Image (spheres, helix red, strand yellow):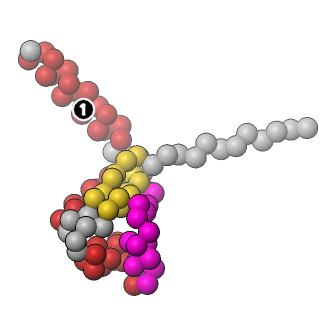
Amino acid sequence: MKKILFILAFCCLFVGAAMAGEPQKVTLKEVGPNKVKVVKIVRNFLDIELKDAFNLVNDVPAVITENASVEQAEELRLALEAEGAVVEVEPAVKAEPEAVQQE
């Protein structure tokens, strides 16, 4: 049993270390009861106008950012969840470069 726990812990550390440098995508799934505070958090994080932040929060589910660091994504998630919002954080999908066809 101890060996299994050790292996699981090692795998979690390995995956966490591998993901540490990857950009994170933060998606607002639900606003929750404190819409005004959620708008304020989004506005401050993105450094955008109040109207733009309000429109973004009204269009849930909405991607807040697609290239946040792990620390930024976690900080944003915690701030939004503290106000009752539902947030999803996942690794950003890297766009594959299109192959150039030569004729």
User: What amino acid is labelled 1 in the image?
Assistant: Cys
For the point 28% across and 75% down, which residue is it? 35
80 lies left or right of 67 = left
Instruction: Specify the quadrant that holds the C terminus.
Output: top right
- In the image, what residue occupies the spot 40% across and 46% down? 91
The residue at the far bottom in this view is 50
Residue where numbered disc 1 is placed: 12
Q: Residue 73 occupies which quadrant of the picture?
A: bottom left
The percent coordinates of residue 12 (x first, y second) are 24, 32
Q: Is residue 30 magenta?
A: no
Question: Is residue 68 visible in this depiction of the protein?
Answer: no
Q: Position of residue 60 (x, y in %)?
A: 40, 64
Asked which quadrant contains residue 72, the reply is: bottom left
Would residue 74 be visible to someone looking at this image?
yes
Magenta segment: 51-66
| Magenta span contains residue 55 | yes
Identify which residue, 30 or 40, lies in the foreground: 30
Above or below for 97 versus 32: above
- Identify the residue at the far left of this view: 2
